[in-house]
Image (cartoon, grey):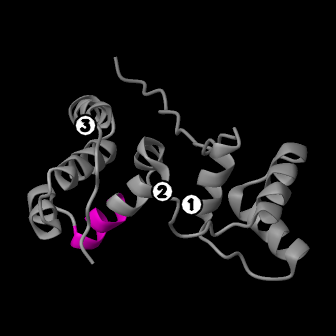
Amino acid sequence: MKCVVELTEAENQTLHRLSVNHKHRGVRTRAAGVLLLGRRVKLTEIASKLGVSGQSAYNWAHTWRKQGVCGLLTGHKGGRPRALSEGMLATATEVARTESMTLGQIAKRIEVVYGEPMPCALETLSVALRREGFSFKRNSFSLKKAQSGRL
């Protein structure tokens, strides 16, 4: 199937401005790709020129036809799901708010409440709690230097 995009003069100008001036590289790339599709450049040429796959350029054309400029600005909504469920995160924030505990203790409390091992590392729990506004400090023990009798 041929990938054809028809652009009006206003759309052409908008895409050109987006491809040059937008602050996000992904939006600039998608705008340049659709602009090239409007000029009847082949998908394979666009892909090699912009350093993307041919499928990406095809997806941009499909998104342009369905949603227009808004589709190019949003990007993709995919990705890996979070390791901590919303319930586990709520339990962790509640525990951290009520008691002063270490990350390991919070993780053990979550395991007790949910009856299953933590689905992620302590670092992931730490990042999730920081996102919720918590901060952790390591206890540091400093050794005091003994006063020497040297003069």
> Magenta includes 54?
yes
Residue depicted at 74% across the width and 81% down the height: 117
Residue 102 higher or lower than 68, as above or below? below
Provide residue 4's location: percent of width, then percent of height.
26, 62
Which kind of residue does numbered mark 1 sit on?
A: Glu
Q: Residues within 10 Å of mark 2 (few under 14, many from 20)?
A: few
Q: Residues within 10 Å of mark 3 (few under 14, many from 20)?
A: some
What's the magenta region? 53-60
Q: Which residue is mark 3?
A: 12
Q: Which residue is mark 2?
A: 66
**Front of the two marks 3 and 1:** 3
Q: Secondary structure at mark 3?
A: helix
Q: CA distance from mark 3 to mark 2?
A: 17 Å
In the image shown, does 50 or 127 lie closer to the viewer? 50
> Residue 62 shows which numbered tag?
none
> Magenta includes 68?
no
Q: Quadrant of the N terminus?
A: bottom left
Q: CA distance from mark 1 to mark 2?
A: 40 Å
Q: Secondary structure at mark 1?
A: helix
In the image shown, does 73 or 114 lie closer to the viewer? 73
Q: CA distance from mark 3 to mark 1?
A: 46 Å
Q: Residues within 10 Å of mark 1 (few under 14, many from 20)?
A: few
Counting residues from the start of the chain, the first of labels 3 and 1 encountered is: 3
Counting residues from the start of the chain, the first of labels 3 and 2 encountered is: 3
Residue that sits furthest to the bottom in the current view: 116
Residue depicted at 77% across the width and 61% down the height: 86
Residue depicted at 85% across the width and 59% down the height: 91
Asked if labels 1 and 3 touch by Cβ distance under 8 angstroms, the answer is no
Asked if labels 2 and 1 touch by Cβ distance under 8 angstroms, the answer is no
> Residue 123 shows which numbered tag?
1
Counting residues from the start of the chain, the first of labels 1 and 2 encountered is: 2
Prevailing secondary structure of the magenta residues: helix
